[in-house]
Amino acid sequence: MEPEGSKNCRRKILMLVSILVIAGIAGADPHEIIVFGITPSEDWGLTVLGLVAMLAHLYWYLLPYQHLKEDGKIEMEPSANFKYLKLRDKHSGIIWREADLLSNRVAFVMTGLAWSFITFWIIPDHGGLY
Protein backbone atom coordinates (compact mmCIF):
# COMPACT_ATOMS: atom_id res chain seq x y z
CA MET A 1 0.00 0.00 0.00
CA GLU A 2 1.03 3.54 -0.59
CA PRO A 3 2.51 5.18 2.53
CA GLU A 4 1.08 8.40 3.98
CA GLY A 5 4.14 10.42 2.88
CA SER A 6 3.41 9.60 -0.77
CA LYS A 7 -0.19 10.67 -0.36
CA ASN A 8 0.94 13.97 1.18
CA CYS A 9 3.20 14.64 -1.81
CA ARG A 10 0.32 13.97 -4.20
CA ARG A 11 -1.91 16.37 -2.24
CA LYS A 12 0.73 19.09 -2.56
CA ILE A 13 1.05 18.45 -6.29
CA LEU A 14 -2.71 18.63 -6.77
CA MET A 15 -2.98 21.81 -4.71
CA LEU A 16 -0.35 23.65 -6.73
CA VAL A 17 -1.47 22.42 -10.15
CA SER A 18 -5.08 23.27 -9.31
CA ILE A 19 -4.16 26.91 -8.71
CA LEU A 20 -2.15 27.09 -11.93
CA VAL A 21 -4.63 25.21 -14.13
CA ILE A 22 -7.63 27.17 -12.88
CA ALA A 23 -5.75 30.44 -13.44
CA GLY A 24 -4.75 29.34 -16.93
CA ILE A 25 -8.20 28.15 -17.98
CA ALA A 26 -9.83 31.25 -16.50
CA GLY A 27 -7.44 33.47 -18.45
CA ALA A 28 -6.12 35.16 -15.31
CA ASP A 29 -3.26 37.59 -15.63
CA PRO A 30 -0.27 35.50 -14.48
CA HIS A 31 1.19 38.60 -12.79
CA GLU A 32 -1.73 38.52 -10.35
CA ILE A 33 -1.46 34.84 -9.40
CA ILE A 34 -0.29 34.21 -5.85
CA VAL A 35 1.88 31.08 -5.57
CA PHE A 36 3.78 30.26 -2.38
CA GLY A 37 2.55 33.63 -1.07
CA ILE A 38 4.34 35.48 -3.87
CA THR A 39 2.84 37.58 -6.66
CA PRO A 40 5.29 38.18 -9.52
CA SER A 41 5.47 41.86 -10.45
CA GLU A 42 7.51 41.62 -13.65
CA ASP A 43 8.21 39.09 -16.39
CA TRP A 44 11.41 37.95 -14.65
CA GLY A 45 9.45 37.32 -11.44
CA LEU A 46 6.93 35.28 -13.40
CA THR A 47 9.72 33.23 -14.97
CA VAL A 48 11.32 32.55 -11.59
CA LEU A 49 7.97 31.66 -10.03
CA GLY A 50 7.12 29.32 -12.90
CA LEU A 51 10.47 27.56 -12.71
CA VAL A 52 10.22 27.21 -8.93
CA ALA A 53 6.72 25.72 -9.30
CA MET A 54 8.11 23.22 -11.83
CA LEU A 55 11.01 22.31 -9.53
CA ALA A 56 8.58 21.85 -6.64
CA HIS A 57 6.56 19.47 -8.80
CA LEU A 58 9.67 17.48 -9.69
CA TYR A 59 10.65 17.28 -6.03
CA TRP A 60 7.17 16.14 -5.02
CA TYR A 61 7.22 13.51 -7.79
CA LEU A 62 10.57 12.10 -6.70
CA LEU A 63 9.89 12.13 -2.97
CA PRO A 64 7.07 9.52 -3.03
CA TYR A 65 9.45 6.93 -4.46
CA GLN A 66 11.64 7.37 -1.39
CA HIS A 67 8.56 6.96 0.81
CA LEU A 68 7.54 3.86 -1.11
CA LYS A 69 11.01 2.41 -0.82
CA GLU A 70 11.30 3.09 2.90
CA ASP A 71 7.71 3.01 4.20
CA GLY A 72 5.69 1.03 1.67
CA LYS A 73 3.80 -2.05 2.80
CA ILE A 74 4.03 -5.16 0.70
CA GLU A 75 0.73 -7.01 0.35
CA MET A 76 1.29 -10.53 -0.88
CA GLU A 77 -2.42 -11.32 -1.07
CA PRO A 78 -5.17 -8.83 -1.91
CA SER A 79 -7.17 -7.91 1.16
CA ALA A 80 -10.91 -8.54 1.22
CA ASN A 81 -11.40 -4.86 2.13
CA PHE A 82 -9.60 -3.42 -0.93
CA LYS A 83 -9.67 -4.15 -4.63
CA TYR A 84 -6.11 -4.17 -5.96
CA LEU A 85 -4.83 -3.89 -9.47
CA LYS A 86 -2.19 -6.41 -10.42
CA LEU A 87 0.47 -3.74 -10.68
CA ARG A 88 3.54 -4.27 -8.58
CA ASP A 89 6.65 -2.24 -8.17
CA LYS A 90 9.26 -4.70 -9.45
CA HIS A 91 11.81 -3.69 -6.82
CA SER A 92 9.64 -3.62 -3.73
CA GLY A 93 6.61 -5.74 -4.63
CA ILE A 94 4.18 -3.00 -3.55
CA ILE A 95 0.69 -3.45 -4.94
CA TRP A 96 -1.06 -0.22 -5.93
CA ARG A 97 -4.71 0.36 -5.13
CA GLU A 98 -6.90 1.65 -7.95
CA ALA A 99 -7.70 4.87 -6.07
CA ASP A 100 -3.98 5.64 -5.64
CA LEU A 101 -3.29 4.94 -9.30
CA LEU A 102 -6.17 7.13 -10.43
CA SER A 103 -5.05 9.98 -8.16
CA ASN A 104 -1.49 9.71 -9.43
CA ARG A 105 -2.66 9.79 -13.04
CA VAL A 106 -4.89 12.83 -12.44
CA ALA A 107 -1.98 14.61 -10.75
CA PHE A 108 0.28 13.77 -13.70
CA VAL A 109 -2.20 15.05 -16.31
CA MET A 110 -2.87 18.22 -14.33
CA THR A 111 0.88 18.77 -13.92
CA GLY A 112 1.22 18.63 -17.70
CA LEU A 113 -1.55 21.22 -18.06
CA ALA A 114 0.02 23.45 -15.40
CA TRP A 115 3.42 23.24 -17.08
CA SER A 116 1.89 24.14 -20.43
CA PHE A 117 0.34 27.26 -18.88
CA ILE A 118 3.62 28.14 -17.15
CA THR A 119 5.49 27.74 -20.43
CA PHE A 120 2.87 29.83 -22.23
CA TRP A 121 3.22 32.56 -19.61
CA ILE A 122 7.01 32.76 -19.45
CA ILE A 123 7.98 32.42 -23.11
CA PRO A 124 8.18 35.91 -24.63
CA ASP A 125 6.26 36.70 -27.81
CA HIS A 126 4.11 33.62 -27.54
CA GLY A 127 1.25 35.43 -29.20
CA GLY A 128 -1.02 34.98 -26.21
CA LEU A 129 -2.96 37.46 -24.15
CA TYR A 130 -0.08 38.56 -21.92
Image (cartoon, rainbow, N blue to C red):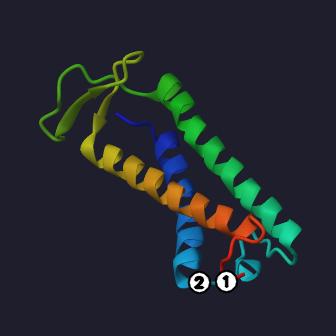
Image coordinates of residue 104 in percent, x first then y, are 41, 47
Q: Mark 2, residues whose alpha carbon is within 10 Å: few (<14), some, or many (≥20)? A: few
Image coordinates of residue 35 in percent, x first then y, are 71, 69
Query: Does residue 52 appear left or right of residue 68 in this picture?
Result: right
Q: Which residue is mark 1?
A: 129
Q: Nearer the viewer, residue 104 or 115?
A: 115
Q: Are marks 2 and 1 in contact (CB under 8 Å)?
A: yes
Image coordinates of residue 56 in percent, x first then y, are 68, 50
Q: Nearer the viewer, residue 40 or 93?
A: 40
Label located before the other in sequence (2 or 1): 2
Image coordinates of residue 5 in percent, x first then y, are 52, 41
Q: Compared to 108, does 44 lie above or below?
A: below
Q: Which residue is mark 2?
A: 27
Q: Quadrant of residue 48?
A: bottom right
Q: Is residue 36 visible?
A: no
At x 17%, y 32%, the residue is: 79
Pick out the residue farthest to the top: 91
Q: Quadrant of the C terminus?
A: bottom right
Q: Nearer the viewer, residue 53 or 91?
A: 53
The three-letter code of the residue at mark 2 reads Gly
Number of numbered discs overlaid on the protein picture: 2
Q: Quadrant of the N terminus?
A: top left
Q: Is residue 127 visible?
A: yes
The three-letter code of the residue at mark 1 reads Leu
Pick out the residue farthest to the left: 80
Q: Nearer the viewer, mark 2 or mark 1?
A: 1
Q: Compared to 122, does 78 lie above or below?
A: above
Residue 12 numbered tag: none
- Name the secondary structure under disc 1: loop
At x 46%, y 47%, the residue is: 7
